[in-house]
Image: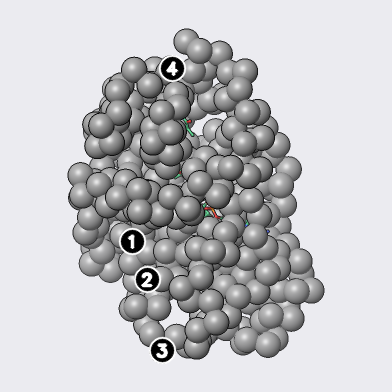
Amino acid sequence: MTIIVTGGAGFIGSNFIFHMRKAHPDYRIVCLDCLTYAGNLSTLSSVMGSENFRFVKKSITDREAVFKLFEEEKPDIVVNFAAESHVDRSIEDPEIFIKTNILGTAVLMDACIKYGIKRFHQVSTDEVYGDLPIDRPDLFFTEETPLHTSSPYSSSKAGADLLVLAYHRTYGLPVTISRCSNNYGPYHFPEKLIPLMIANALNDKPLPVYGKGENIRDWLYVEDHCRAIDLIIHNGRAGEVYNVGGHNEMKNIDIVKMICRELGKPESLITFVADRKGHDMRYAIDPEKIHRELGWLPETRFSDGIKKTIRWYLDNRDWWETIISGEYRNYYEKMYGGREVL
Ligand code: NAD
Ligand code: DAU
């Protein structure tokens, strides 16, 4: 079995590669990643050069390179993690999101059609459903919830999802889609809420909470997401969408306070800053379908997962300090430098 994993040098893709190496040691894994700011080859150092693993530095939008790779590898399965993934960046500059997330997905599927494939799996997001009101805790996203996006990022992901389903209906491509809630865990890029707060707290820097910090996200430990994708690519039904989430809703402010407590840092570091434009209020997944059809359940409770994650950032300071001391400084200055303090 040969699997092409795109975006495997990023957060979830790398964790998926580590999961698959353990769960299916006989599979050949080919990682296709063009190493944007979010891709990090050092993350993959433990598998680089090992048997049954190949890394290819190319973009999923590079049709010639993608077709050449398919010609060489004749993959059985493609799992597409490659994407521009940060909502705040999409608000500043949408174009690359449209190119990578929509066009790149189409290029991969065109190659799947030409060379034949057992499964094309699209890693999507719960953000394609838009948001839920904060005063209706009885409402959840199901696979039937209409797509209703808020940001250029989520719109590009929704566009890709529609294309994936169209390739299934029109060309009979055997596709599946997973729509997962917010992940956290090792190798999470420090522009995102949890790693940003851990890194800033450890450096005694302000902790910039958008608005009042009352927005709710539904957090899932990354390994649980990886297990879900493994199940879907092997046992999921072609043409189907599977929501993935663990019923773990938390307000942003409560997460940031928890991080302060775990690290022994004062809550006075918390600074309320101007809100994200179009900020989604609440995400909450109903994971009943993947549980019923594939037997998936989350295994890591948030209280354990957040401790493990904080421990990982303490034990792997080199990994994130290298990132935040480079180009990231310009990004941070642009996003937070002149931001209004509320
Ligand atoms: P990430 O930003 O950490 O990693 C993205 C990876 O894709 C990087 O390695 C980057 O170099 C690579 N990449 C970007 N453009 C590329 C291109 N044109 N060609 C090849 N590689 C390219 O993202 P992540 O958080 O690991 O998210 C992975 C996927 O999961 C994304 O599709 C995202 O939409 C989805 N998702 C993320 C979350 C989350 O909480 N992080 C939740 C649900 C779904
Ligand atoms: O729900 C799945 C999505 O989760 C994925 O599709 C995205 O790729 C991923 O980035 C994530 O999107 P969010 O926008 O929810 O994640 P982020 O970590 O950027 O923000 C989480 C919440 O924290 C959100 O309400 C905004 C807030 N926030 C974020 C940052 C970076 C702050 O208050 N301060 C910050 O500095």
For badge 3, the amino acid type reads Asp
Residue at screen point 32% across, 46% down: 310
**Residue at 43% in and 67% down:** 16
The CA distance from mark 3 to mark 2 is 13 Å
Q: Which label belongs to residue 272?
A: 4
Instruction: In this rendered view, identify the residue nearer to me: 45 or 239.
Output: 45
Secondary element at image label 3? loop
The 10 Å Cα crowd at callout 3, few under 14, some 14 to 19, many 20 or more, is few
Report helix, strand or loop for mark 2. helix
Asked if the residue at tag 2 contacts the one at tag 1, i.e. Cβ–Cβ closer than 8 Å, the answer is yes
Circle 1 residue: 223
The amino acid sitting under disc 4 is: Phe
Q: Which residue is mark 2?
A: 19
Identify which residue is drawn at 30% across, 28% down. Answer: 265
Q: Residues within 10 Å of mark 2 (few under 14, many from 20)?
A: some
> In the figure, 117 relative to 202: above or below?
below
Distance between mark 3 and mark 1 Cα atoms: 20 Å
| Mark 4 vs mark 3: in front | 4
Q: Position of residue 47 (x, y in %)?
A: 48, 76
Q: Residues within 10 Å of mark 1 (few under 14, many from 20)?
A: many
Does residue 302 appear to the left or right of 324 in the view shown?
left
Location of residue 211 with respect to 123 vertically, above or below? above
> Which residue position is annotated with label 3?
26
**Residue flagged by tag 1: what amino acid is it?**
Glu
